[in-house]
Amino acid sequence: MEIFIGSSKESVQLAHNIASILEKEGCCTKVWDESLFVPSTFTLENLERIAKEVDAAVFVFASDDKLWYRGNEFFTVRDNVLFEAGLFMGSLGITNVCICTSGEIKISTDLHGFITITCDKDSNNLTAELRLWLNNLKSSLQIKMFSRSYVDNHPTLEQRWKYAKEVIIVNYAATSFISSNLIASESVYSHKIEDLFERKIHEGTNFKFLLTSPGSYADYDAATYKMCVVANSDVNARDAITTAAKVIREKSRKYEAEKGVIEYKFTDIALPYAGMLVINDEKYSYMDHVKIDIYSPLLLNDRNRRSFIVYKSNKENYDFFCDNISKMWAEGQKYISYKPHVFNDITADRYEHFKCGNIECKFEVYDEEIGFDNNVDIYFSCFFIIIAGEMDVTLKKEKRNTLIHLKTGDAIVIPRQTYYSLKIQSKTRLLKIVSQY
């Protein structure tokens, strides 16, 4: 949650004290003196822009100026601070603006009855009252949609994960989290995300990943229309999902001894969006939120994708996305059917494919020689029937390799949890049956 903090110049230290308290509560803050105003523009223009970007605002009403009213002398808030508070109330709604007072001041009659927080109390009371305000922010907190590059940093992922107990990520490949070199070998941004992910695992945050099933139509849809792999990437779009599926398995094994747990499933759904559901420790549950990145097709710049964050206080929209992500996770599969790696960048893209319950069948036609360049560990039974042509199968069991040559009319069953590799000759047609049993 992003919060603007305004004050007079004389009260700026108090504004930074409030910012420090809010940041400890998991908020991202913008204090007015932190270079927020763009040079060669009007102050009012900048204030209107900031009011559209943030979720809430805090203003310090201090005894900055003297006022003589009906023969009496009073102290009052600086006039521009009063104006700015009204501007933000009009943009964000009254309940999303908090007023903190310092000293004995005269407040405009229009604000009589408006409950304020007294800053002159000890820090524990100030923290408790600010936390109470955060807990009761307007339930219809506005959803603000910006580019992904902006939303990823306002607030930052580190701020949003600060008190995370569980994170559910729905994504085509989740490469930014599990293997940054799949995105770009020189991407400092991606490496920071991967480092943060590993640190949170060590601290005890549990992660659930729902990824696209390699070889499914959703894989084809993502690689063809929706994935933007940058120039320095170690893999191309068609291999990113398959490679990510292998990496997530390796990660889950690597961190078995850590406090946090990594779970992963796969889905055949052509995802309309990437979703991240963040569930915090109970004390900070009001910061629970869902971040949505819309998968728009044919984008040239993935960082320009439209994104937004929905907080728990926005009950109707939060419940919608929370329920949707939870259902997709529940429907996800714990096994995948790997798409073969190929020689000469030639794929077997002509096949008939159908599913019946837990059984999946594919009729595949290969006009050129193809093969796996890595052994694949499968979690299902696999049955091959050679309709025409030839194929070599190498099975690895208990450190022994067994090479089996199959020709037209031959068949083979590969049991669960068996490493195998294939080399399929040109002009080969085969029927592949995959069973979860």
Image (cartoon, rainbow, N blue to C red):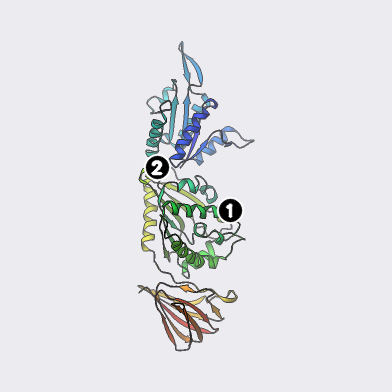
Residue 271: numbered disc: none
Q: Residue furthest right?
A: 40
Residue 368 horizontal side relative to residue 215, left or right: right
Q: Residue 97, percent across and down?
A: 44, 34
Residue sitting at 60 percent across and 76 percent down?
344
Residue sitting at 54 percent across and 83 percent down?
425
Residue to which mark 2 is pinned: 140
Mark 2 is surrounded, within 10 Å at the Cα level, by few (under 14), some (14 to 19) or many (20 or more) other residues, namely: some
What amino acid is found at the position of numbered circle 2 in the picture? Ser
Q: Residue 62, percent across and down?
A: 48, 24
Q: Is residue 18 above or below residue 240?
A: above
Q: Nearer the viewer, residue 390 or 299?
A: 390
Q: Is residue 429 above or below residue 309?
A: below
Residue to which mark 1 is pinned: 188
Check disc 2 and report its element: helix, strand or loop: loop
For the N terminus, the quadrant is: top left
Distance from disc 2 to disc 1, alpha carbons, whole Å, reads 36 Å
Q: Which quarter of the figure has residue 209?
A: bottom left
What amino acid is found at the position of numbered circle 1 in the picture? Val
Q: Which quarter of the figure has residue 56?
A: top left
Q: Residue 86, percent across and down?
A: 47, 30
Q: Which quarter of the figure has residue 190?
A: bottom right
Residue 265 horizontal side relative to residue 243, left or right: left
